[in-house]
Image (cartoon, grey):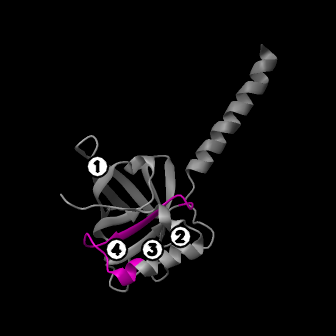
Amino acid sequence: MKTFQKIAVPVTLGVLGLIIYRSCSAGTPKGAVAVNNFDAKKYLGRWYEVARFDYRFEKNMDNVTAEYSENPNGSIRVVNKGYDYVKKEWKESVGEAQFVKNKTEARLKVSFFKPVWAGYNVIDIDEDYQYALVAGSSLKYLWILSRTTTIPESMRQRFIEKAKKIGYNTDELIWVKHNQ
């Protein structure tokens, strides 16, 4: 029994450590570069999710918004809200985002349940901060955001082309309905 414990405990701790390390990834997909000369204050406020990849935390969600505000400690408060059209109920998640290096590089890590952090990288944004392309830590996560519920076709094409060049399969984007 003691031999089993001598092997099982270190292996279990090693596996747990690897899981925590991988879940704390705040990286950027290969080929994606976060915006430099980023103005965090201009990014604050409400954004509408125009498109995204399907993943479990936003499954069956329409009318999705993200509200960003500055916390007293300089981090960013994140409030994501959406309507689950299957369960017919609104859902909300509150989290925190922190800049990975400095506030002029749009490379952040975000957490909705600490100590798990994920990458949040603004990889394209228009000069007026009305439309943004956001990459997660891997090619599984991509969002197109707008200050309104729609996006001009020229911006849509710009973001799709950029995402394709990085390696995203943009045919899998879900175009979010905003009707409530």
Residue 133 in picture, x, y percent from top left: 43, 72
Q: Is residue 83 visible?
A: yes
* Label 4 packing within 10 angstroms: few (<14), some (14-19), many (20+): many
Read off the magenta span: 137-156
Q: 148 or 27: nearer the eye?
A: 148
Judge from the rendering whether residue 1 lies leftward or rightward of residue 99; answer left or right.
Answer: right
Q: Which mark is residue 103?
A: 3
Q: Which mark is residue 92?
A: 1
* Label 1 packing within 10 angstroms: few (<14), some (14-19), many (20+): few
Residue 72 in picture, x, y percent from top left: 32, 62
> What residue is disc 2 on?
101
Three-letter amino acid code at the position of disc 1: Glu
Q: Which mark is residue 43?
A: 4
Q: Quick check: is 112 in the magenta stretch? A: no
Three-letter amino acid code at the position of disc 3: Lys
State whether residue 115 is above or below residue 27: above
The outermost residue toward the left is 180
Sequence-first tag of 2 and 1: 1
4 and 3 marks in contact (CB < 8 Å) = no
Find the distance from the CA under tag 2 to the CA under tag 3. 7 Å
The outermost residue toward the bottom is 127
Q: Which mark is residue 72?
A: none
Residue 58 in picture, x, y percent from top left: 38, 51
Element at label 2:
loop
Q: 110 or 55: nearer the eye?
A: 55
Find the distance from the CA under tag 4 to the CA under tag 2. 17 Å
